[in-house]
Image (cartoon, rainbow, N blue to C red):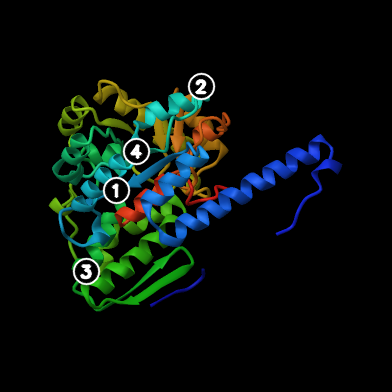
Amino acid sequence: MFVEGRGTLLALEHLDMEQHMMVGERLARAVLRAARGVAQAGIASRPALNVARILGVRRATIFMLHRFTDGGSPAYGTDVAMLRRMLATLRRQGVQFMRLRDLMAHVESRTELRRPTAVFTVDDGYHDFADLAAPIFAGFDCAPTVFLVTEFVGGRQWNWWDRVRLAFLRSPLMAVSIRVEDRRFSCLLGTPAERDARATEFIESLKWVSDAERLRVVDRIGALLGIDVPALPTADYAPLSWEDVRALERQGVDFGPHSLTHPVLSRVDDEKARLEIAGSWDVLRRECADPAPLFCYPNGSLDSFGAREMGIVRDAGMSGAVAFRRRYVDPRTCSAEDRFCLSRFPAPEDVLSAGYLASGLAWDGE
């Protein structure tokens, strides 16, 4: 496959006050680095959380999930048996679960957290959340925030990457060559696993072309790969319905906007950026009793949104937004700008890693 184109003592008595403060900061950083090394050496959640409590580390870890599976391939989602073990372990080890909007209230008031905190978010709005994950979260009194692609939930579109993936998986062709702008994506289609990997690579490349070009290619993906793509998502890719959303909301699940159609916002013009952000928030306010006034940037990397998008979120009346940066959230130090790009971690694939991340020690955040 190829893609074209792309043990020293410090004499403190001789230091002035400013120097004393600098030394204090350096010592604090050194202690944190040493603690992080001790915890990481065993990659064990309980030691890491114990060290965090001793040091008074009170950060929030926002976890980002998408799909769920009940024993299928982990490539297609978080296994719900692991999710249950993870929630049980975090609860047993003293991590507090918090709704995202409640964490935002701490951020707005700069109120210190009492102990290491975990917040769970779920992107896109697939039906497997209702089928598999929601009962498990409810069993641990953990209220996740689900960010909805509103045209998907409204039954008017596939998620575009799912349409591409299905075409790669079902194509009768053994090789493809697709022109995207001034580049050509060429690959062999072999086993299902190889087809899935090639689809992932192609989807990633489509994120960073112009929005018009992405739409052009996705609209033609069936013809390009020799299959008829159904007009609506198949059962494997089905969304929540608005009836599902309202029922889950009554059970304590929070819902927030994740755009209308999930473009990479930095690749669209001003008008479409406003429509995707403010429009999806308008839909949530119509369809939900009490939607969370928090936006989730599609893709979420720092090159997929910027000051323009943060301003649109603010102007639309929302109080914050989440991104994807692998940083902790400390309400005491979050700036007004930080509220509109709160950081998240991808959901870990095992219980020990979840505890280590939730300790607040796993990542420097620098």
Looking at the rendered structure, the kind of residue marked 4 is Gly
Disc 4/disc 3 C-alpha distance (Å): 54 Å
Name the mark nearer the viewer: 3 or 1. 1
Q: Which comes sooner in the sequence, label 1 or label 4? A: 1
Locate residue 250 relative to residue 332 in the image: left or right: left
Q: Position of residue 86 (x, y in %)?
A: 27, 48
The residue that disc 4 covers is 94
Secondary structure of the residue carrying numbered label 3: loop
Identify the mark nearer the N-term, 2 or 4: 4
How many other residues sit within 10 Å of disc 3, few (<14), some (14-19) or many (≥20)? some
Q: Which residue is mark 2?
A: 109
Q: Secondary structure at mark 1?
A: loop
Instruction: Specify which label sits upstream in the sequence, 3 or 1.
Output: 1
Residue 82, image x, y percentages: 23, 53
Q: Which residue is mark 3?
A: 226
The amino acid type found where label 1 is placed reads His
Give the crowd class for mark 2: few <14, some 14-19, many >=20 residues within 10 Å: few
Q: Residue at x 47, y 69 (%)?
A: 183
Q: Is residue 298 left or right of residue 199?
A: right
Observer able to see residue 135 = yes
Q: Earlier in the sequence, mark 3 or mark 2?
A: 2
Rounded to the nearest angstrom, the CA distance separating label 3 from label 1 is 29 Å
- The amino acid sitting under disc 3 is Gly
